[in-house]
Image: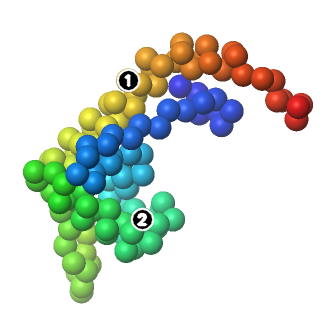
Amino acid sequence: MPTDSAFPRIRLRLDFGRGLVLGPGKADLLAGIAELGSISAAGRRMKMSYKRAWSLVEEMNAAFAAPLVDSSRGGAGGGGASLTPTGQAVLAHFRGLEAMLAEDARGDIAGISALLADISDGK
């Protein structure tokens, strides 16, 4: 799907009940942790406070049968974080759903877009 900001996008949110919603923000946080090896660095990249990033990780870790993120405290050697195999699987499934929805919805999005009013001239 084009990344043009004028093109509509689909944002997937999975509500599992029990207080767990998995959406693009948590998926991006998991991806950032996988890429950067740090919960705080992943949160900073998303302009999220350290406390908020840790809170989301704790929420996800508690909701699944196995933790999604494994972390070690900082110190002289520095801390770090990585996705567990469960975290990798959750992220891969979520990204797969996003890709499938984007592809399968392309025709319907184009149909709805064709029915929108023309506001290109500020009308």
Q: Position of residue 86 (x, y in %)?
A: 16, 47
Q: Residue at left 70%, top 16%?
A: 115
What kind of residue is marked 2?
Answer: Gly
Name the element at disc 1. helix
Judge left or right: residue 38 versus residue 103: left
Q: Position of residue 38 (x, y in %)?
A: 32, 66
Local packing at callout 2 (Cα closer than 10 Å; few below 14, some 14-19, many 20+) is many
Judge left or right: residue 77 versus residue 54: left
Q: Report the residue marked by disc 1.
A: 100
Image height of 107 relative to 70, above or below: above
For the C terminus, the image quarter is: top right
What kind of residue is marked 1?
Answer: Met
Image height of 50 relative to 81, above or below: below
Local packing at callout 1 (Cα closer than 10 Å; few below 14, some 14-19, many 20+) is few
Residue ranking furthest to the bottom: 76
Q: CA distance from mark 2 to mark 1?
A: 27 Å
Disc sitting over residue 43 in the figure:
2
Image height of 107 relative to 38, above or below: above
